[in-house]
């Protein structure tokens, strides 16, 4: 499915209060329940960077390794910003969601919407420009629990 966050009414006060339900949270829940072959986050930038991508010297992180406990390994120098209209946590929330999904053995790709890379990722092919979230080798070894990340 293609998802986007939205405002939803809370069950306790169905007519009075609403909260923001993040598309990232929806994807985590769906991946836990459905165990898809892959999860793809589409963003307005090519992937996850070591700092806001508009800053000089920002580097695209091609791969982020997830520990057995779902923690991001070796990402000490990560700095982020969120757009003023983003009330769901920006890229930090997306990284946390992608880590939760990848820790369960579902490959995760973050890439830029509207690009050939996004089209390839959605079709299950290897995108050239993206960030991949992969489990630490000691848990699953190469290729995750599904025996491979992408078709060639």
Image (tube, rainbow, N blue to C red):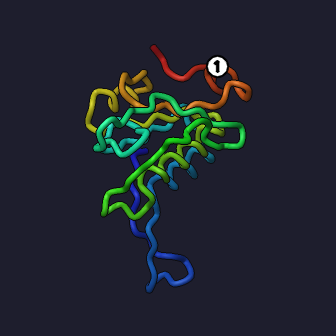
Secondary structure of residue under mark 1: loop
Dot 1 alpha-carbon crowd within 10 angstroms: few under 14, some 14 to 19, many 20 or more: some
- In the rendered view, tell whether residue 98 sits above or below residue 129: below
Give coordinates of residue 20: x percent, y percent.
Answer: 44, 68
Question: 92 and 121: which one is in front?
Answer: 92
Q: Which residue is drawn at 40% across and 43% down?
A: 51
Quick check: 108 left or right of 123?
right
Quick check: 122 left or right of 105?
left
Give coordinates of residue 53: x percent, y percent.
Answer: 32, 41
Q: Quadrant of residue 44?
A: top left
Quick check: 126 left or right of 31?
left
Going by the picture, which residue comes out furthest to the top? 152
Q: Which residue is drawn at 44% across and 54% down?
A: 23
- In the rendered view, tell whether residue 49 sits above or below residue 149: below
Q: Quarter holding the N terminus?
A: top left
Q: Quadrant of residue 73?
A: top right
Question: 96 and 61: which one is in front?
Answer: 61
Q: Quarter holding the C terminus?
A: top left
Question: 77 and 31: which one is in front?
Answer: 77
Question: 106 and 65: which one is in front?
Answer: 65
Give coordinates of residue 4: x percent, y percent.
Answer: 38, 54
Q: Residue at x 42, y 22 (%)?
A: 125
Q: Which residue is drawn at 49% across and 81% down?
A: 14
- In the rendered view, tell whether residue 148 sits above or below residue 9: above
- The residue beneath circle 1 is 142
Number of labelled discs? 1
């Amino acid at each position: 499915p293609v998802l986007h966050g939205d405002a939803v009414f809370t069950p306790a006060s169905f007519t009075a209060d609403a909260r923001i339900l993040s598309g990232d949270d929806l994807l985590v829940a769906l991946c836990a329940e459905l165990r898809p072959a892959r999860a793809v986050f589409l963003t307005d930038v090519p992937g996850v960077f070591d700092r806001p991508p508009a800053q000089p010297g920002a580097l695209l992180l091609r791969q982020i390794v997830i520990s057995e406990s779902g923690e991001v390994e070796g990402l000490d120098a990560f700095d982020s910003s969120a757009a003023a209209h983003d009330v769901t946590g920006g890229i930090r929330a997306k990284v946390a969601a992608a880590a939760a999904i990848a820790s369960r053995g579902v490959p995760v790709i973050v890439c830029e919407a509207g690009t050939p890379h996004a089209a390839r990722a959605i079709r299950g092919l290897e995108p050239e420009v993206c960030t991949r979230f992969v489990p630490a080798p000691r848990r699953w070894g190469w290729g995750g629990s599904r025996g491979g990340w992408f078709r060639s």
